[in-house]
Amino acid sequence: MEKELSGVRILLGIIFIILGVLGLFLPILQGILFLILGAGFLGYPIPERYLNKIRFGRSLKTKKTK
């Protein structure tokens, strides 16, 4: 199941990046918005173990659980 979601995330990320590049040249599309969305889908999520090691990990965990 996780591999399927990973494939979907990569596919969506690539589609949004392509739309973002097209949007930089076409005035109809919002290029920057699609580039940010594509980068978000292609970026790696922060594993839970890193949330415990960084300085503000506890506050991030409490905000995440609320």
Image (cartoon, grey):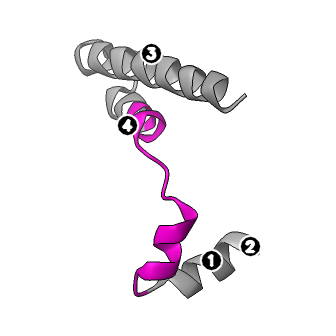
Query: In the rendered image, which residue does mark 1 sit on?
Result: 61
Q: Give the Cα separation between the discs numbered 2 and 4.
A: 24 Å
Res 65 quadrant in image = bottom right
Rendered position, 10 above or below 58: above
Which of marks 3 and 2 precedes in the sequence?
A: 3
For label 4, count other residues whose C-alpha is less than 10 Å away and answer few (under 14), some (14-19) or many (20+).
Answer: some
Query: In the rendered image, which residue does mark 4 sit on?
Result: 39
Can residue 29 be spotted in the picture? no
Q: Give the Cα separation between the discs numbered 3 and 4.
A: 11 Å
Instruction: Name the residue: 27% across, 18% down.
Output: 21
- Circle 1 — which element? helix
> Is disc 2 in contact with disc 1, using a CB cutoff of under 8 Å?
yes
Residue 29 % position (x, y): 40, 19
For label 1, count other residues whose C-alpha is less than 10 Å away and answer few (under 14), some (14-19) or many (20+).
Answer: few
> Is disc 3 in contact with disc 1, using a CB cutoff of under 8 Å?
no
Q: Give the Cα separation between the discs numbered 3 and 1.
A: 31 Å
Query: In the rendered image, which residue does mark 2 sit on?
Result: 65
Rendered position, 18 above or below 60: above
Rendered position, 50 above or below 3: below
Q: Quadrant of the C terminus?
A: bottom right
> Is disc 3 in contact with disc 4, using a CB cutoff of under 8 Å?
no
Instruction: Name the residue: 48% across, 35% down.
Output: 41
Residue 14 within the segment the image draws in magenta: no
Which of marks 1 and 3 precedes in the sequence?
A: 3
Which of marks 4 and 2 precedes in the sequence?
A: 4
Q: Give the Cα separation between the discs numbered 2 and 3.
A: 31 Å
Q: Which residues are magenta?
A: 37-55
Q: Inspect the image, locate mark 2, and give the three-letter code of the amino acid beneath it.
A: Thr
Q: Give the Cα separation between the discs numbered 4 and 1.
A: 23 Å
Residue in front for this viewpoint, 46 or 60: 46
